Image (cartoon, rainbow, N blue to C red):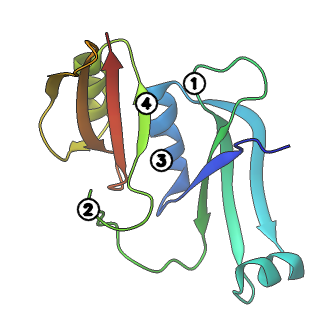
Amino acid sequence: MIRFGHVNIIAKDCEKIIKFYKDVFGCRSIGKKRDLRGEWLDKLTGISNVHITGEHLAMPGYDKNPPTLEIFSYDQMVGNLSHKINECGIAHLAFEVDNVDETLEKLLANGGGTVGELVHTNYEDGSKATFVYATDIEGNIIEIQSWN
């Protein structure tokens, strides 16, 4: 069996990011808060005395056994919060919504930002879509999309 499980975001402040994804996209707590440390985790991460806290949130649109958004913070963080849409690696999370404009307004009201402009496009097969690339409060890129 192969089944998608979760996506992980390493956040500077996991509590703020958790609230953001709950408020903007309707992700929900499922009772899987984490406060992890120990020899097994040191071996897994390759970091001595590592300590991770955070939570798994159910992704919206699923009733049973949803994939989750795992949001963690490490006691010791490295790197910066700058992400580019054309950087190698995982580029963005995508959420399909009923109304891109309203969701973008909610995202911006909760401290998120934009990458580019909101666009409407028609595909050769007759389908129509509305898209915008935005960011959460720590700069992670999110695609908000709606299909007609």
- Element type where label 1 sits in the image: loop
Q: Where does the N terminus fall, quadrant-wise?
A: top right
The amino acid type found where label 2 is placed reads: Lys
Residue 60 is tagged as: 1
Where residue 4 appears, as percent x and y from the top left, is 69, 43
Q: Earlier in the sequence, mark 3 or mark 2?
A: 3
Residue depth check, mark 3 versus mark 2: number of the one nearer the observer: 2
The answer to whether 92 is drawn above or below residue 76 in the figure is above
Where residue 119 appears, as percent x and y from the top left, is 14, 28
| Residue 72 in which image quadrant | bottom right
| Residue at image mark 4 | 95
| Marks 4 and 1 in Cβ contact (< 8 Å) | yes
148 sits to left or right of 13: left
82 sits to left or right of 16: left
Q: Nearer the viewer, residue 13 or 69?
A: 69
| Residue 88 in which image quadrant | bottom left
| Residue at image mark 2 | 84
Where residue 93 appears, as percent x and y from the top left, is 44, 43
Task: Please state the total of marks drawn on the protein image.
Answer: 4
